[in-house]
Amino acid sequence: MRNKKFKFPFKITYESPVTLAFVIVSLLFFIVDTFILKEKLSALFLSSPTSPKGDLPFELSKGISYLRVIFYAFGGSKSPVFFFNLLLILILGSDTEEKYGSIVIGIMILVSTIFSGVINASFSPHSLQGAASIVFMLLFLTCFDSLSKKKISLRMLIIFITLCITYSKADGPLAFSIALAGGLCGSLLAFLTSPKARKIRKASGLKEKAEVLVEIDDSNSPRFKSKASKNQEDSSDETIIGQIDF
């Protein structure tokens, strides 16, 4: 009797590669920094540079300052909203990446991160940690898409209000404003410049126009008129019993 080999009945898919890659890298940094290096990475380059009077002033001659402008988005292990950020990125990033494309989302993640890092290095004496600007970027992209269809998503509105309260209390008003500005900058560029998104919006607009034209043509067609007249006859209270010829 031959031994049957066990085959796993399910296929593991790697959807939304940019979103998943960001979350996986963030988790790896968290594990290494927390359990192996004892938060040495956070002090080294997982915190954004600050203004000249801050804790980590940006120095043009040091390459570590440029790394901090980007890699601070993977940090935030001390923040209570670190895993909250990653969860929101997984929820919002999957559909957004499918709609706009992996390349566009990757670029906008980089734009939002650098924009917030540069603003923080210019004005704030405290370092940023975490992906708050990326969360806002994904949230704004989803909201802009709903507004382009003349709809307001109550779900996105509740998430936005919750984020505003959470980030302003956890990081302070200045850090919250910087993250908000970075997310807005990245989302506007993606919404306006993405070729894939423009095609989808154009296709959805053409589909809505086609449905309206079909309804108009159907209402003027003989089939529609005959159907309407038949319904009118059926709804009449008069009953014809017979016919007398003189």
Image: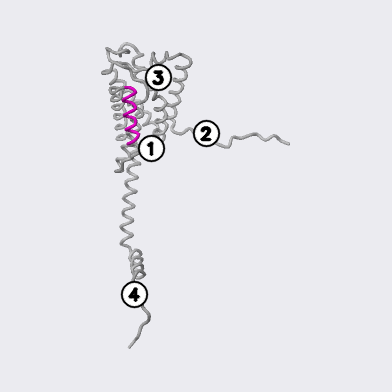
Amino acid, disc 1: Lys
- Residue linked to disc 3: 78
**Tag 2, which secondary structure?**
loop
Give the spatial CA distance, label 4 vs label 3. 82 Å
Give the spatial CA distance, label 1 vs label 4. 58 Å
Amino acid, disc 3: Lys
- Residues under numbered marks 1 and 4 in contact, where contact means CB atoms less than 8 Å apart: no
Ranked by sequence position, the earlier of labels 1 and 3 is 3
Q: Quadrant of the N terminus?
A: top right
Task: Determine if the magenta segment contains residue 246.
Answer: no
Q: Quadrant of residue 46?
A: top left
Q: Quadrant of residue 147?
A: top left
Q: Position of residue 180 (x, y in %)?
A: 30, 27
Mark 1 or 3: in front is 3
Q: Main secondary structure of the magenta part?
A: helix
User: Which residue is at a point 26% across and 18% down the rendered structure image?
Assistant: 123
Give the spatial CA distance, label 3 vs label 2. 32 Å
- In front here: 198 or 31? 31
- Residue linked to disc 2: 12
Image check: 38 left or right of 52?
Answer: right
- In front here: 230 or 79? 79
Residue 99 — which label? Answer: 1
**Tag 1, which secondary structure?**
helix
Amino acid, disc 4: Glu
Image check: 198 left or right of 32?
Answer: left
Q: Position of residue 196 (x, y in %)?
A: 36, 38
User: Which residue is at a point 38% across and 13% down the rendered structure image?
Assistant: 43
Task: Determine if the magenta segment contains residue 162.
Answer: yes
- Residue linked to disc 4: 238
